[in-house]
Amino acid sequence: MNLEQVSNEASSTALGSSGGISIFFWLITIILVLVLMGVLYYLLTRLIKGGTRNTRIGLVKKYFIDRNFYIGILKIFDEYYMVLFSNSSSEVIKKIEYDEIQDIVENKNNFVNTFASVLNKEKKSNEK
């Protein structure tokens, strides 16, 4: 046997038996890792979209004024605020009581009148 024939036999045996098996296991491992990453990605995106709901802070009701503006009743713990929201900012208009909220939510048609009366009360108190 010459040296070239020995090296060809050694390389063919290494690739044929152990090399082929190790490549097969690497391929299976890579596929499993990719599948695992896909499953984790799916679960994380599903959890992030739903998220945990905070019952202490939330928007009770919102009334659209314009496409970019709306007035909302914001609940923070046990306090309620009437807030004006826009695309780039928000401003607290007034702190309101729970009784006023019930009136506003039940009488949606009268909301404009209620909102106008709130603004008028604020305006009169500022003028005095």
Image (cartoon, rainbow, N blue to C red):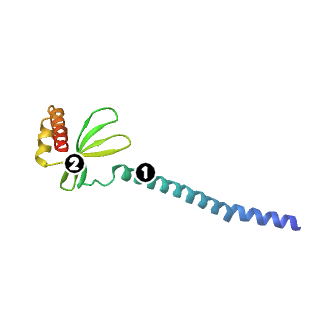
Q: Quadrant of residue 9?
A: bottom right
Front-most of 2 and 101? Answer: 101
Where disc 1 sits, the SS reads: helix
Mark 1 residue crowding within 10 angstroms, few (<14) / some (14–19) / many (20+): few
Q: Position of residue 84 (x, y in %)?
A: 28, 42
Where disc 2 sits, the SS reads: strand
Residue 37 position (above or below residue 109): below
**Residue at position x 12%, y 44% from top?**
100
Q: Which residue is mark 1?
A: 42
Q: CA distance from mark 2 to mark 1?
A: 37 Å
Residue lying furthest right: 2
Q: Position of residue 102 (x, y in %)?
A: 12, 43
**Residue at position x 60%, y 57% from top?**
27
Q: Which residue is mark 2?
A: 81
Q: Position of residue 106 (x, y in %)?
A: 12, 38
**Residue at position x 20%, y 44% from top?**
126
Under mark 2, the amino acid is Tyr
